[in-house]
């Protein structure tokens, strides 16, 4: 079966490299409101809490 090529080498490298954020961007992406803190506190595992916060920051950064 032939291999499907989804991303070029440059696209793969860009996808696997995290964005470089300025301090102001970090604050705006990862600031947690009281409502969000309640959600984070309801998660049982530290891994889930960190994953949730990282996903929240990612979607805030790329929401446009």
Image (cartoon, grey):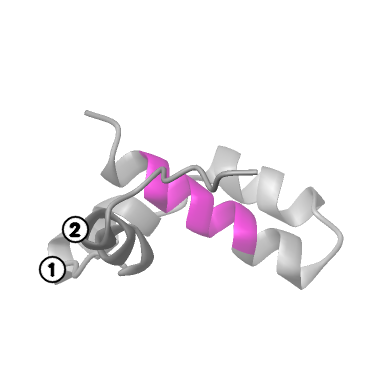
Q: Residue 47 placed where, x, y %? A: 73, 69
Q: In the visual, does 35 lie left or right of 26? A: right
Residue 34 % position (x, y): 54, 45
What SS does tag 1 mark? loop
Residue 61 numbered tag: none
* Looking at the image, residue 10 lies above or below residue 34: below
Judge by depth and name the residue closer to the eye, 4 or 63.
4
The quarter of the image holding the C terminus is top left
- Where disc 2 sits, the SS reads helix
Q: Which residue is mark 1?
A: 22
Mark 1 neighbour class, 10 Å CA radius: few under 14, some 14 to 19, many 20 or more: few
- Asked if marks 2 and 1 touch (Cβ < 8 Å), the reply is yes
Q: Position of residue 8 (x, y in %)?
A: 27, 53
Local packing at callout 2 (Cα closer than 10 Å; few below 14, some 14-19, many 20+) is some
Residue 6 placement, left or right of 24? right
Vertical placement of residue 28 versus 27, above or below: above
Q: Residue furthest right?
A: 44
Of the pair 34 and 45, the residue shown nearer to us: 45
State the image quarter where residue 26 is shown: bottom left
Along the viewing direction, whichever of 32 and 14 lies nearer the viewer = 14
Residue 47, above or below 39 = below
Q: Residue at x 19, y 58 (%)?
A: 25
Look at 61% across and 50% down and name the residue there.
37
**Image spot of residue 19 (x, y percent):** 24, 64
Question: Bounds of the magenta span?
Answer: 51-59
Q: Give me the disc on residue 25.
A: 2
How many numbered callouts?
Answer: 2
52 falls in the magenta region: yes
3D distance between C-alphas at marks 2 and 1: 5 Å
Looking at the image, which residue is at 28% across and 66% down?
Answer: 13
């Amino acid at each position: 079966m032939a291999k499907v090529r989804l991303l070029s080498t440059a696209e793969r490298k860009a996808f696997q490299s995290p964005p470089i954020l300025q301090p102001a961007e970090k604050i705006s992406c990862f600031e947690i409101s009281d409502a969000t803190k309640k959600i984070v506190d309801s998660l049982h595992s530290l891994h889930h809490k960190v994953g949730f916060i990282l996903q929240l920051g990612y979607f805030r950064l790329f929401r446009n």
